[in-house]
Amino acid sequence: EKITISVIKADIGGWPGHSRVHPQLVETAEEVLAKAREEGTIIDFYVATCGDDLQLIMTHKKGVDSSEIHGLAWRTFEEATKVAKELGLYGAGQDLLKDAFSGNVRGMGPGVAEMEITLRKSEPIVTFHMDKTEPGAFNLPIFRMFADPFNTAGLVIDPNMHMGFRFEVWDIKEHTRVILSTPEELYDLLALIGAKSRYVIKRVFPKEGHKISKDEPVAVVSTEKLYEIAGEYVGKDDPVAIVRAQSGLPALGEVLEPFAFPHLVSGWMRGSHNGPVMPVPMHQANPTRFDGPPRVVALGWQISPEGKLVGPVDLFDDPAFDGARQKAVEIAEYMRRHGPFEPHRLPMEDMEYTTLPGVLEKLKDRFEPVE
Ligand code: 13P
Ligand code: 13P
Ligand code: MG
Ligand code: MG
Ligand code: MG
């Protein structure tokens, strides 16, 4: 029997500014979801936060893209938005871009990562939650987990994963996708996903012959592009991901290892700057320096045979990641010294808002030809 894990998140108001989620929003979400659990709509849930993003982690038997589950998430965000408005939180309801729910939250503002899976005898999973960045921020770490033998020893020494994996990559500008196999197509994959603002890993699948069916995802990332949805700046679409671990998949430590390197991602201040992503426990996921630097939280779970969420374990709450945090602080300092200059500030086409057209308009009569 299959269980679905759904992580649906939204920024429905920051406290203060874009820094964190107010605890009353968490309480409100817990009340709504507890009722849904009592009524049997969902099996289990946990409400987490990362920066100013409210994260609903749910298990149920309704499959992915279920209007019942998406409707529940939407209602939860609406209820919490009422509280955000009462408290006067910043950007209350920011990510609820449509007035009425129409069957699916995709394209309506919230970010979604979901997978329907056949539970293994033991099912360890990690949910990742990022703030102040975009879905392409997962390209490098997901690649490392499932395709880089210098990260994942199992690719070399575990007969159950030596065959490699398949990556589903979305072109988020053209709205198309392609599936690439590693290790055979490693360089083609990298040619795409290195351009992380355009080609985004959506899912990873096993290959034929793996213990897990080749049609069941082993990793999934949210990919909503809010600025395309709304046609204007509404905040970078702070992403989430779900990754399964162990027995023929990367071990828990191989799933976390990529984050020992605080790689550069787009987002940070005003969604318009490059900076390092800092791995932190949930209580440190409150970006304040220049509204950042970007954060990633990793929550560890075992799924019980009935589909209960046994956890969370706050996985970056480990001094072994202190070095990565310190490095992120150093890189943040270095990047900040560039002020409004690229590559700290994003190139023009990737900024979430810009004064450039206005400046050009004002100066248009003063530009003269150069011989
Ligand atoms: P243990 O010996 O602690 O079970 O660890 C096994 C393992 O494979 C760790 O990656
Ligand atoms: P969020 O995307 O987390 O709301 O942040 C937006 C922003 O402008 C930060 O400076
Ligand atoms: Mg915000
Ligand atoms: Mg946010
Ligand atoms: Mg954002």
Image (tube, rainbow, N blue to C red):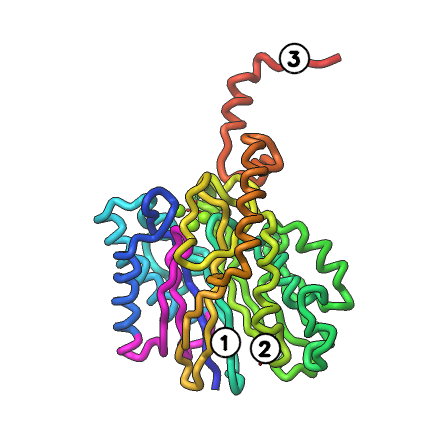
Mark 1 Cα-neighbour bin, 10 Å: few <14, some 14–19, many ≥20: some
Q: Which residue is mark 2?
A: 246
Residue 132 drawn in magenta: no
What residue appears at the point 58 percent right and 35 percent down from the top-left corner? 348
Residue type beneath disc 3: Glu
> Would residue 155 appear left or right of 237 to someone viewing this image?
right
Q: Is residue 241 visible?
A: yes
Q: Position of residue 201 (x, y in %)?
A: 61, 60
> Would residue 182 appear left or right of 332 to someone viewing this image?
right
What residue appears at the point 41 percent right and 59 percent down from the top-left corner? 282
In which quadrant of the rendered image does the C terminus lie? top right
> Would residue 181 appear left or right of 199 to someone viewing this image?
right
Q: Which residues are magenta?
A: 37-64
Location of residue 261 by image quarter: bottom right
Ligand 1: does it lie within 8 Å of the C-beta at label 2? yes
Residue type beneath disc 2: Gln
Q: Which residue is mark 1?
A: 116
Q: Is residue 318 above or below residue 290?
A: below
Mark 2 Cα-neighbour bin, 10 Å: few <14, some 14–19, many ≥20: some
177 or 315, nearer to the observer: 315
Q: Which residue is mark 3?
A: 368
Q: Position of residue 100 (x, y in %)?
A: 33, 56
How far apart in space, not on screen, are marks 3 and 2 (Cα)?
64 Å
Extreme residue in the front direction: 319
Q: Position of residue 344 (x, y in %)?
A: 58, 37
Q: Position of residue 314 (x, y in %)?
A: 44, 65
Q: In the rendered structure, which disc, 3 or 1, sits on the residue that comes first in sequence? A: 1
> Would residue 175 appear left or right of 226 to someone viewing this image?
right
What residue appears at the point 69 percent right and 66 percent down from the top-left corner? 147
How far apart in space, not on screen, are marks 2 and 1 (Cα)?
18 Å
